[in-house]
Image (cartoon, rainbow, N blue to C red):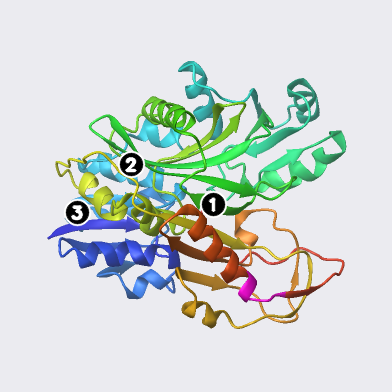
Amino acid sequence: MRRILILGASRYYVPIIRQLQASGRYICHVCDRDPAAQGATVADAFHPVDISDAGAVLRLARGLALDGVMPVNDFGVPTAAKVAGALGLPGLSERSAALTTDKPLMRQCWQAAGLPIPAFRVLTAGEDIAATCAEIGFPCVLKPDFSGGGARGVSVIACPADIPAAIAHCAPHARGGRWLVEAYLDGLELSAESVSIDGHVHLLALGDKQILPPPGCVTQSIQYPAALDPTTAERVREVVAAAVLALGIREGFAHTELRLVAGTPYLLETGARGGGGHIFHTLIEAVSGVAAPLLQADLLCGDTVALSRVEARGAGCYRFVIPPPGRVVALRSPAGLANLPGVVDWQLDLQPGDLIRTPASGLERAGFIVTLGRTRDEAVQRANQAEAWLEISIAPEHTKHRPSSGLGPA
């Protein structure tokens, strides 16, 4: 039995823990700063340690005789790299961990590699953001150097009047004190899931996304497989592979987001872990047949892994429940979603009387529905049916900030 440390214990990581346990090959140690996290009761051993505190996690890990360390979100990536390096375990280098969690470093890496990216500038505290936005041109996008995913702190700036609000939204997430201003690309957004094995990048799942209108950049729905012609899909695969390898991800999973403009895929972000929420443990397997958490654990424990050519298996839809702003008047109990075809999971953080607003980040969505199908059209139709079934009734009203529910992938 291999002993693996999983960095994160929220609701979304429970299926990862269970998949590894069900294989009969892994003892799952799990750490999270929240002792009430759902994964705490599922883990073989739970440790209430903050995953972003690399020193504390390393002290814990030294006493566990580990075979591997698995990050499942951006906050855990630098910690996993430090722990694995210190203990002589397989994993990402600390340099690559920095490249995949620091947006300015990532852009500079891709620029040096000659990869397609939007025009950008990196700013530090005190520099003139307004002048830089004017230089890049409107509309442009303001991002913090590290956000942890979920479009935290990200805003589209349509004109100079939008800049103060964008700064206020971005500042709390700029942990390194730097900002990224980049050109806004108006095109289809894509979400790509890949795994690198001995320097060869396999594209396992490619979805297209529906994004809420600016100023936020919040995902409303992801459909798998993406509706692309074979030539464009191959071009995306080539760009994803080059981007992942440029960042030093020669072993393990990566989650890459792109925008397709006039047939050219432009890189937005890459995370050195599987996609957030249900992407890693449910949707990748649905569309490719690859059990992603188990494959990632095998790689992180140093196993020799062979992956044959990936073939399309099925389809899925990750639909986020985002009602219009206003007051919730009525809705059906989401428990009934279990009786609808193709619905494999859901969560709804709404009740009558709630005051809601358009979400500023992925953490403020009201819920989600995950559907599977034999084809993309079937999966999307099932998601549409499930969302409509909830019959959420909203009364328009002037809205204030709605507390974050923490729903959706990071």
Tell me the distance, in whole angstroms, between the alpha carbons under discs 2 and 1. 33 Å
- Counting every numbered tag in the picture gives 3
- Alpha-carbon span between mark 3 and mark 2: 14 Å
Whether 168 is drawn above or below 176: the answer is below
Q: Within the image, what quadrant is residue 362 found in? A: bottom right
Q: Which of marks 3 and 1 is in front?
A: 1
For the record, the magenta segment spans: 388-392
Spatial distance from mark 3 to mark 1, Cα to Cα? 36 Å
- Reading the image, the residue beneath label 2 is 82
Per the image, label 1 sits on a secondary structure element best described as strand
Q: Position of residue 119 (x, y in %)?
A: 64, 22
Q: Which residue is the site of mark 1?
A: 222
Residue 48 shows in the view: no
Q: Which of marks 2 and 1 is in front?
A: 1
The location of residue 42, given as percent across then percent down, is 31, 73
Q: Position of residue 65 (x, y in %)?
A: 16, 55
Q: Give the amino acid at mark 1.
A: Ile
Pointer 3 residue: 66
Q: Earlier in the sequence, mark 2 or mark 1?
A: 2
Three-letter residue code for mark 3: Leu
Instruction: Say left or right for 80 vs 389.
Output: left
Q: Is the magenta stretch mostly helix, strand or loop?
A: loop
Q: What element carries label 3?
A: loop
